Amino acid sequence: MRKVEPYGVETLPQVYAADRGPAALAADRGLAPLVTGSGPAALAAHRGPTASIEVPGAPAACRGALTERARLQWHLRDGGDPATLAEEFLAAHGLALHDLSRPATAHQHGTGVCGAALYLSAAAGAHLAGAPTTAPEPAPTLPDLTVVVYGHHPTPADPAGPPASAWWLGEWTESWTRRQHADAVTSVRAAIGRGDVYQTNLVGHAAARYSGDPLPALRRLGALPGARYGGVLTGDGWAIGCASPETLIEVTDGQLITRPIKGTRPATAAGRAELLASAKERAEHVMIVDLERNDLARIARTGTVTVDELFTVRRWCDLWQAESTVRAAAADGLGLADLLRATCPGGSVTGAPKRAALTHINALEPVGRGASMGALGWVAPGRVDLGLTIRTAAADGQRLHTWAGGGITWDSDPAAEVAEAAAKTAPIRATLAGR
């Protein structure tokens, strides 16, 4: 249930692990170690059919009774269509998502499968949009598509292991300098002046070496205030931690909902007033709302696209952000594959027109977006709930990775855009470090 706080801010519900009680939360805060080992060994210890289930969007009634049944992992280099692969894999394992316009049948606990985690990278989304994806990925072990099917079964408690090695996180190394970031903003403004795009989102990457088990750090990230899609997803040699407040696409009983976020200020009374009064932020926001309306119109019944809320200010950690809600009725026969093709990658992290913006992103950003700016969440019969992976970090066997950026319009100031990206990533880095 949503709770409205002073200044019209929502306190968003948290999504916790299947076994998240006081002990699990204490472990997330670094008060109790999870596993022994470091790097790949530590990550491997968290995989397996009885590992804790912490997928964003997993229904509360199912937590504590989920067991992994099947898994699909795919990289762009494998070839094929990730949207089709996801829908076909789910159907083959008892989750037919061929017509999301129909209400779901009642879920029967203890029979069949419950649902699935679905992760789609930004690069996979760009591939679906027909855009180039040539930037080198900073964490190439991360998959571009992961689908994990879960069944209902009481999950045995993970056996306690020896104490974990101490957590250490090194200095962050940026993939571009502040000057290069500012120059990229200037390049986007020039493209807007030529009429190539109206808006383009630019994202920077940073990485830091670590030792110890990264899962507690990623869980701390998922527990940040306002993380509507807080949680983690793990695989062999990798893990993703998400603290996203943004709904990429939600489908319930044939209703499509997206909640784009655009516009950021410090979480002070003055910051809120400045955000509400900013013509630049409102123009940027409305452009993305129009883009999202267009995306939904491609897969909606004619005449059903509406904007329920426009430019509502809400809080994530120590930042105010502007959010809108766009709603539509799903077209008859809308399947998961077509849903992903229409909505991925998200408009708020690409720009308008989307394909032209993606081309500029590929040319300007020095590395790929990895686990960020993609989709992560839960799917089940008649139900899709995918968050946009902003405020997201990922671990490979050696390094933690973060990404942050913002939308660029004609009115953007390069120095201000660099500062905004730093403000977005600061709480993420502090949380990962354990501060």
Image (tube, rainbow, N blue to C red):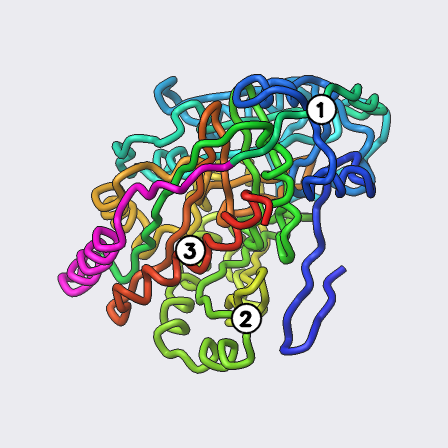
Quadrant of image for the N terminus: bottom right
Q: Is residue 44 left or right of residue 11?
A: left
Q: Name the residue nearer the viewer: 240 or 194.
A: 240
Q: Which residue is mark 2?
A: 267
Q: Is residue 175 left or right of residue 23?
A: left
Q: Which residues are magenta?
A: 169-196
Badge 1 marks a residue whose secondary structure is: loop
Q: Nearer the viewer, residue 102 or 154?
A: 154
Task: Give left or right: position of 124 versus 394.
Answer: left
Camera-near label (3 vs 1) is 1
Task: Tell me where residue 162 appears, x and y as whole percent.
Answer: 73, 19
Identify the residue at image location x=44%, y=32%. Answer: 209
Rounded to the nearest whole Å, what is the CA distance between mark 3 and mark 2? 21 Å
Going by the numbered disc 1, the residue's amino acid type is: Pro
| Quarter of the image where one finds residue 215 | top right
Mark 2 packing: few (<14 Cα in 10 Å), some, or many (20+)?
some
Q: CA distance from mark 3 to mark 1?
A: 42 Å
Indicate the position of residue 308 as horizontal and vertical percent values: 58, 68
Q: Secondary structure at mark 3?
A: helix
Q: CA distance from mark 2 to mark 1?
A: 38 Å
For marks 3 and 2 on the same chain, the one whose residue lies earlier in the sequence: 2
Q: Mark 1 = which residue?
A: 163
| Residue bearing the label numbered 3 | 348
> Is residue 174 a member of the stretch shown in magenta?
yes
Q: Nearer the viewer, residue 343 or 417?
A: 417
Asked whether the residues under the numbered discs 3 and 2 touch, taking CB atoms below 8 Å apart as contact, a structural biologist would say no
Q: Earlier in the sequence, mark 2 or mark 1?
A: 1
Q: Is residue 125 visible?
A: no
Mark 3 surroundings within 10 Å by alpha-carbon count, few (fewer than 14), some (14 through 19), many (20 or more): many
Residue type, mark 2 in image: Ala
Q: Nearer the viewer, mark 2 or mark 1?
A: 1
